[in-house]
């Protein structure tokens, strides 16, 4: 069963009402559609790193399983992980083009740098679907989340946590990798909520979303601003959130200030249970990955009606306008809705979360 957590805004729903048209009339593919194929298809899947737990644990296996289910077990997924190297991802992309895969799903480490590879695939008649992050170049479609909303949700959580003290509170922002196009959207959404509501004393961009870089930058902030003066930390994802919390604890924090996150990593959910991390943004990667597999298969098999039904939104990149898109809603995950989100969706079980270290904390919030 594909359960979708309740969305926190009407934005995604409103977007879903726009942009539905004939497949050939939307986007800028730059080449004619390939001839429709049967079930014997090959999907190339390029994911960006292994530091983000979801990619290896969920996205790849879900896409692989869904492609097989949609093709009567005849379709296959050729997979490569760039391990945070744009150069490696480019080589992997070119290898897939050389292997003549039928379609490429790419989660680009560097949206701009990957554009020539997208063009080469298109010139070879291989459609390209941008996955999770919007790659530049003539992509055929995009599946992700409302990324500006992600930042808004994180920022609103901080303001809620600070309450009446928000306007006098000093905030540190730990943003993502500037090469990732989603980073700008997360930041834009967050700043739109935080400006005028809190005092943003320092901001950092974090190359390759590196937890080690985030921890080093957090230590700089602690020395500069003072541990007791940091009221909250906006962290763009869970990997960095864990590093931020480690830095705060190493500096002597007996009570960690509110720290945000994104991706609902298992260790982040456990930190939320224990009270160390305030929240994370749960993006249903089950729905995202399932939709991506469906889009890829529909595109190769020439199922235009089904493809259009999934891509009712449109987005623009710096190089291509009105790209057909599927934007999956997001939800703020806190102590109060763990059961209704990651557990209800089957991402984790109570047993996964409530290991011996967290048993007492789980019991305290009724998670059992």
Image (cartoon, rainbow, N blue to C red):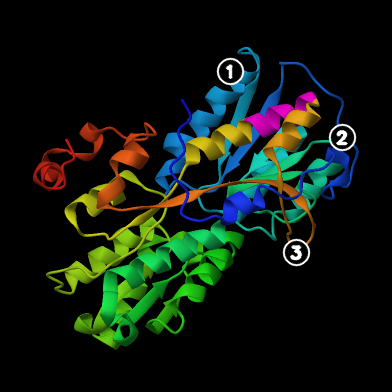
Q: CA distance from mark 1 to mark 3?
A: 35 Å
Q: Which residues are magenta?
A: 294-301
Q: CA distance from mark 2 to mark 1?
A: 24 Å
In the depicted structure, whether residue 293 falls above or below residue 231: above
In the depicted structure, whether residue 362 falls above or below residue 169: above
Q: Is residue 296 magenta?
A: yes
Give the residue pinned by disc 3: 318
Q: Residue at x 57, y 37 (%)?
A: 80
Give the residue pinned by disc 1: 69
Secondary element under disc 2, as helix, strand or loop, is loop
Q: Residue at x 77, y 28 (%)?
A: 300
Give the residue pinned by disc 2: 33
Q: Residue at x 29, y 44 (%)?
A: 338
- How many residues crowd around disc 1 within 10 Å: few (fewer than 14), some, or many (20 or more)? some
Describe residue 197's horizontal placement relative to residue 329 as left or right.
Answer: left
- How many residues crowd around disc 2 within 10 Å: few (fewer than 14), some, or many (20 or more)? some
Q: Position of residue 203 (x, y in %)?
A: 43, 78
Taking depth in this image into account, of 30 and 200 the one nearest to the observer is 200
Mark identifier at residue 342: none
Q: CA distance from mark 3 to mark 2?
A: 23 Å
Q: Is residue 2 magenta?
A: no
Q: Residue at x 43, y 49 (%)?
A: 52
């Amino acid at each position: 069963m594909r359960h979708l957590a309740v969305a926190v805004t009407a934005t995604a729903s409103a977007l879903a009402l726009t942009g539905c048209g004939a497949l050939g009339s939307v986007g800028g593919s730059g080449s004619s559609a390939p001839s429709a194929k049967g079930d014997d298809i090959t999907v190339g899947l390029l994911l960006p790193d292994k530091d983000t737990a979801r990619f290896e644990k969920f996205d790849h296996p879900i896409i692989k399983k869904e492609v097989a289910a949609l093709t009567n077990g005849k379709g296959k997924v050729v997979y490569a992980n760039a391990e945070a190297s744009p150069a490696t991802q480019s080589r992997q992309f070119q290898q897939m083009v050389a292997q003549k895969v039928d379609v490429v799903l790419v989660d680009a480490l560097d949206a701009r740098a990957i554009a020539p590879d997208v063009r080469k695939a298109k010139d070879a008649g291989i459609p390209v679907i941008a996955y999770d992050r919007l790659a530049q170049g003539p992509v055929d479609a995009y599946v992700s989340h409302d990324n500006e909303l992600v930042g808004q949700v994180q920022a609103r959580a901080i303001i809620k946590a600070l309450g009446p003290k928000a306007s006098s509170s000093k905030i540190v922002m730990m943003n993502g990798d500037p090469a990732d196009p989603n980073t700008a959207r997360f930041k834009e959404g967050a700043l739109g909520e935080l400006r005028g509501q809190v005092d943003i004393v320092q901001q950092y961009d974090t190359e390759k979303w590196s937890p080690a870089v985030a921890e080093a930058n957090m230590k700089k902030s602690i020395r500069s601003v003072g541990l007791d003066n940091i009221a909250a930390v906006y962290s763009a994802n869970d990997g960095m959130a864990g590093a931020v919390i480690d830095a705060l604890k190493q500096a002597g924090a007996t009570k960690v200030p509110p720290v945000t996150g994104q991706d609902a990593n298992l260790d982040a959910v456990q930190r939320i249970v224990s009270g160390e991390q305030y929240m994370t943004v749960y993006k249903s990667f089950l729905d995202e990955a399932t939709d991506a597999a469906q889009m890829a298969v529909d595109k190769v098999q020439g199922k235009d009606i089904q493809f259009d039904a999934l891509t009712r939104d449109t987005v623009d990149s710096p190089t291509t306008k009105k790209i057909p898109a599927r934007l999956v809603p997001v939800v703020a995950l806190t102590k109060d809705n763990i059961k209704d989100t990651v557990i209800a969706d089957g991402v984790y079980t109570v047993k996964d979360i409530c290991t011996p270290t967290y048993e007492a904390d789980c019991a305290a919030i009724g998670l059992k």
